[in-house]
Image (tube, helix red, strand yellow):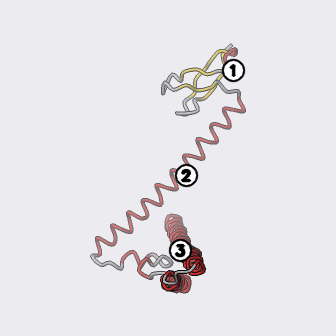
């Protein structure tokens, strides 16, 4: 007796002997190796294929919306066409996290100041010919490098946090705009 199964790769149905349940066979449609599944496995694969098709349709509708907006912008001949239909996303607005970026700049200045002061103190300590002068020179140099590294790390962290927050804001704004535009299209299609 034959069992009806489905290919994991292409989604086409095929039949196989009962003895091959769970084993690998070659799909007659796409030629790839696939397992022979029972009814539950077939339903699971069909659900995965439907989910993938839904995601592809959503993605293509979003791309079509963006193409339509770009076409409208080209057709109208002005740069503000997309901004007219897109309320939330404003790419020319710049950063929304100025304080984090300013903190990063201030920390960078502090880091270089620490490094410079430690270098000057190490140089002055190097002119002392005693053992204490050598130890002081070494300590100033190590403290300067360590202080510079810590404050520079904090500076880079504040830049990164500001960048991440800006990207999240832009993604959120784009998604809001896409959802609003899709709702407008659905409303216009229903009329």
Cβ–Cβ under 8 Å for marks 2 and 1? no
Asked if residue 6 can be seen in this view, the reply is: yes
Q: CA distance from mark 2 to mark 3?
A: 37 Å
Disc 3 residue crowd, few under 14, some 14–19, many 20+, Cα 10 Å: some
**Foreground of the two, 10 or 102:** 102
Disc 1 residue crowd, few under 14, some 14–19, many 20+, Cα 10 Å: some
| Residue 86 located left or right of residue 183 | left
- Mark 2 lies on a secondary structure that is helix
The residue shown at (53%, 65%) is 186
- Give the mark, 2 or 1, whose residue is nearer the N terminus: 1
**Foreground of the two, 154 or 190:** 154
What number is the disc on residue 55?
Answer: 2
- Counting from the top left corner in percent of width and height, residue 57 is at 51, 52
- Give the mark, 2 or 3, whose residue is nearer the N terminus: 2
Q: CA distance from mark 2 to mark 1?
A: 30 Å
Name the residue beneath numbered marker 3.
Answer: 156
- Mark 1 lies on a secondary structure that is loop
Name the residue beneath numbered marker 1.
Answer: 21
Q: CA distance from mark 3 to mark 1?
A: 57 Å
- Counting from the top left corner in percent of width and height, residue 80 is at 36, 80
Which mark is in front, 2 or 3? Answer: 3
Cβ–Cβ under 8 Å for marks 2 and 3? no
The residue shown at (56%, 77%) is 134
| Residue 129 located left or right of residue 2 | left
- Counting from the top left corner in percent of width and height, residue 142 is at 57, 74
Q: Residue furthest right?
A: 40
The residue shown at (52%, 71%) is 167
- Give the mark, 3 or 1, whose residue is nearer the N terminus: 1
Asked which quadrant contains residue 15, the reply is: top right
């Amino acid at each position: 007796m034959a069992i009806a199964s489905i290919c994991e790769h292409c989604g086409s149905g095929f039949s196989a002997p009962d003895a091959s349940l769970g084993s690998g066979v070659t799909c007659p449609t796409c030629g790839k190796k696939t397992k022979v599944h029972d009814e539950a496995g077939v339903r699971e694969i069909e659900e995965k294929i439907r989910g993938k098709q839904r995601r592809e349709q959503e993605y293509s509708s979003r791309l079509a919306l963006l193409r339509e907006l770009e076409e409208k912008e080209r057709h109208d001949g002005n740069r503000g066409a997309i901004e007219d239909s897109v309320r939330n996303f404003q790419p020319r607005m710049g950063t929304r996290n100025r304080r984090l970026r300013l903190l990063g700049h201030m920390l960078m200045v502090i880091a270089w100041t620490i490094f410079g002061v430690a270098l000057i103190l190490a140089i002055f300590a190097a002119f002392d010919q005693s053992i204490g002068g050598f130890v002081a020179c070494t300590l100033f140099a190590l403290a300067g490098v360590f202080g510079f590294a810590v404050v520079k790390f904090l500076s880079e962290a504040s830049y990164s946090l500001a960048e991440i927050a800006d990207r999240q804001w832009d993604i959120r704004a784009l998604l809001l705009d896409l959802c609003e535009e899709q709702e407008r299209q659905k409303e216009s299609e229903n009329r």
